[in-house]
Image: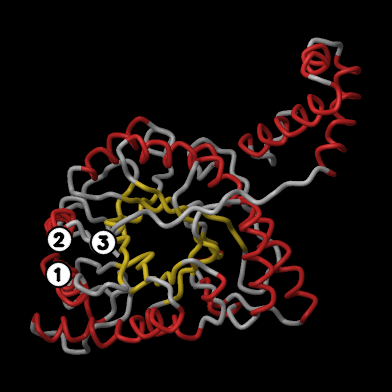
């Protein structure tokens, strides 16, 4: 009907299910006849077939393993412009440039919106062509595949006022029930879109620290996602230090971590101190991997190009002077500390924009393109690719 609250990707899939149900019940000739019939007759048939489709068994898609080898990834942030969004030719050009940096995987990040940490409402169908549409997700995954890259779909919630999503927590049991109902609708919707796109991995949640204790609700949510996609599933814990507190790793296929743990409090730390800092902060992840039998993927990791970036990697707004070389030193420390660890299966560096914009001189944001960090990442990725780094 052109209702802008409806995703075209979901609408096409729904229509296909109705037509399939009609063909099974009455034969393909009946479907062709109905589609050529007057609107009223067509609507009556579709209504009946929709009921048949709703009653039909829907087996879960066949599960797929994680892509082989080490995931040499970048977090692929969408530029909110028509000319630079996931669905644009410019995005395909950007991905092609990443392939030349030995990147073999991207994370595609559709966002939902919630007004505050106590709200039970989550808005997630975007129809503006400059926004994060479902069609954009499908395009980005397809473009990545066209360049022999894999794609992780990593849906996230954006809270009003830029509040931290880890603060999401409800006031009472009724609100918790309503919130998880909303969240399941969002994450299953994104899983259906990811499956339609053929995504290679899917993230069921990102940094939702305040919800992690709700083990039963998360178990139900993960089970619902498995009915929607056969992609291997991860969850993105908030920092390495937060990963051991997540109680539902065994229900997933890999341990995801948004790795922003400080490496040292020393603003003048040496390279060896930074390497030790990575080993110290990430050490528990190796134990967690052995305990659960799951590999670890850094679903995000990054350092802002500011002085002593390792002291607070999560914070690009400190006002510290620009110092891209310091960020590159921290990136190098991660590789030097972990690249021989067999439990470490991949990293998605934060971040590259889909319009391919280059970082400006003096910029303090995380944009990697044109920075010393990008050079360090490309060199390490090329080394890992040459070594055939396998799990």
The residue at 30%/55% (across/down) is 74
Name which quarter of the figure residue 338 lies in.
bottom left
Q: Within 10 angstroms of label 2, few (less than 14), some, or many (20 or more) residues?
A: many
Q: Secondary structure at mark 2?
A: helix
Q: Position of residue 38 (x, y in %)?
A: 86, 11
Q: Position of residue 78 (x, y in %)?
A: 41, 47
Q: Is residue 387 above or below residue 17?
A: below
Q: Considering depth in this image, is 204 or 61 the residue closer to the camera?
A: 61
Tell which circle, 2 or 3, labels the residue nearer the N-terminal end.
2
Q: How is the image coloured?
A: secondary structure
Residue located beneath label 2 in the image: 380
How far separated are the C-alphas under marks 2 and 1? 8 Å
Q: Considering depth in this image, is 10 or 289 the residue closer to the camera?
A: 289
The residue at 42%/69% (across/down) is 256
Q: Secondary structure at mark 3?
A: loop
Q: Is residue 31 above or below residue 312?
A: above
How far separated are the C-alphas under marks 3 and 1? 20 Å
The residue at 65%/51% (across/down) is 60
Q: Secondary structure at mark 1?
A: helix
The residue at 51%/61% (across/down) is 233
Q: Quadrant of the N terminus?
A: top right
The answer to whether the residue labelled 2 contacts the one labelled 1, judged by CB atoms less than 8 Å apart, is yes
The answer to whether the residue labelled 3 contacts the one labelled 1, judged by CB atoms less than 8 Å apart, is no
Tell which circle, 3 or 1, labels the residue nearer the N-terminal end.
1
Residue located beneath label 3 in the image: 390
Tell which circle, 2 or 1, labels the residue nearer the N-terminal end.
1
Residue located beneath label 1 in the image: 332
- Numbered disc in front, either 2 or 1: 2
Q: Position of residue 146 (x, y in %)?
A: 34, 34
Q: Position of residue 295 (x, y in %)?
A: 38, 71
Q: Within 10 angstroms of label 1, few (less than 14), some, or many (20 or more) residues?
A: some
Q: Is residue 9 above or below residue 186?
A: above
């Amino acid at each position: 009907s052109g209702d802008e609250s409806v995703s075209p990707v979901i609408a096409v899939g729904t229509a296909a299910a109705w037509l399939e149900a009609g063909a099974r019940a009455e034969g393909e000739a009946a479907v062709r006849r109905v589609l050529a019939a007057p609107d009223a007759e067509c609507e009556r048939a579709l209504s009946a077939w929709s009921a048949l489709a709703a009653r039909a068994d829907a087996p879960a898609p066949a599960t797929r393993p994680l892509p082989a080898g080490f995931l040499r990834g970048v977090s692929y942030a969408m530029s909110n412009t028509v000319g630079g969004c996931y669905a644009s030719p410019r995005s395909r050009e950007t991905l092609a440039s990443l392939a030349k940096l030995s990147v073999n995987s991207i994370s595609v990040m559709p966002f939902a919106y919630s007004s505050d940490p106590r709200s039970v409402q989550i808005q997630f169908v975007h129809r503006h062509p400059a926004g994060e549409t479902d069609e954009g997700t499908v395009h980005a995954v397809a473009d990545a595949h066209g360049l022999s890259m894999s794609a992780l779909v990593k849906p996230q919630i954006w809270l009003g006022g830029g509040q931290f999503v880890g603060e999401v927590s409800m006031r009472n049991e009724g609100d918790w029930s309503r919130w998880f109902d909303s969240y399941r609708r969002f994450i299953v919707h994104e899983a259906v879109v990811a499956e339609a796109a053929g995504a290679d991995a899917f993230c069921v949640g990102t940094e939702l620290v305040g919800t992690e204790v709700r083990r039963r609700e998360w178990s139900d949510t993960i089970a619902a996602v498995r009915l929607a996609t056969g992609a291997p599933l991860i969850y993105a814990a908030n920092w390495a230090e937060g990963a051991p507190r997540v109680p539902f790793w065994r229900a997933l296929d890999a341990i995801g971590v948004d790795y922003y743990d400080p490496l040292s409090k020393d603003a003048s730390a040496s390279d060896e101190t930074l390497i030790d800092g990575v080993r110290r902060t990430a050490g528990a992840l190796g134990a967690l991997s052995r305990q659960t039998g799951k590999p670890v993927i850094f679903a995000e990791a990054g350092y802002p190009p500011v002085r002593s970036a390792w002291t607070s990697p999560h914070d690009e707004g400190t006002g510290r002077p620009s110092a891209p070389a310091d960020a590159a030193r921290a990136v190098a420390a991660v590789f030097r500390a972990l690249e021989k660890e067999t439990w470490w299966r991949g990293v998605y560096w934060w971040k590259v924009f889909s319009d391919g914009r280059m970082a400006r001189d003096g910029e303090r944001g995380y944009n990697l393109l044109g920075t010393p960090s990008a050079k360090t990442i490309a060199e390490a990725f090329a080394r890992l690719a040459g070594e055939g780094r396998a799990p």
